[in-house]
Amino acid sequence: MSVINLKVNGRTHSIDVDPETPLLYILRNDLVLNGPKFGCGLGQCGACTVIVEGEAIRSCITAVGLVEGFEITTLEGIGTPEKPHPIQQAWIQEQAIQCGMCMNGHIMNAKALLDRIPHPTEAEIRQGLEGILCRCGTYYRVIRAVKRAGEIMLAAGVSNREVIEL
């Protein structure tokens, strides 16, 4: 066991844990952040996606020791029910959610994409969301939601890199 210092959604946490423990377990069990989901446990479905230093990663296959000292953003770190991030707002407006299992992966990958490319083409959106498994098949609504999020952010003058302080 080692003390690992994590910066998650702007807050620092010290956790005594085996450095090989999957980040997802720490986020869900120790920090009680339920945005990232346990889907496949193999990094194949994307339900566990978080953003580390601007890059969307699969937290179920990332050892917590590898992300010590890096800024980690979860779904909870980009908006609240009272003040949703434009990406979350677009998801609601486009009704891009059905069962919700893939939502975290799609939103976090969309955020990482929009941080890099504020107005992506449909091909760039498809590539940016590649590998996120949606069992309900809402892919077309998700693509529309990413486009709408970019438009909302442009109209509101929202910085793509904003993270809420909890």
Image (cartoon, rainbow, N blue to C red):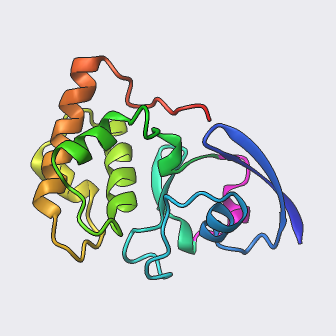
Q: Quadrant of the N terminus?
A: bottom right
Front one among 105 and 52: 105
Q: Is residue 91 left or right of residue 139?
A: right
Q: Is residue 11 left or right of residue 16?
A: left
* Residue 25 found in image quarter: bottom right
Residue at figure coordinates x 62%, y 65% from the top left: 28
Q: Quadrant of the C terminus?
A: top right
Front one among 97 and 112: 97
Q: Position of residue 64 (x, y in %)?
A: 69, 64
Above or below residue 59? Residue 50 is above
68 inside magenta stretch: yes
* Residue 45 found in image quarter: bottom left
Front one among 143 and 53: 143
84 inside magenta stretch: no
Q: Position of residue 41 (x, y in %)?
A: 50, 81
Residue at figure coordinates x 31%, y 17% from the top left: 157
Q: Position of residue 47 (x, y in %)?
A: 41, 68
* Residue 98 found in image quarter: bottom left
Residue at figure coordinates x 20%, y 55% from the top left: 96
The stretch in magenta equals 62-70
Above or below residue 90? Residue 23 is below
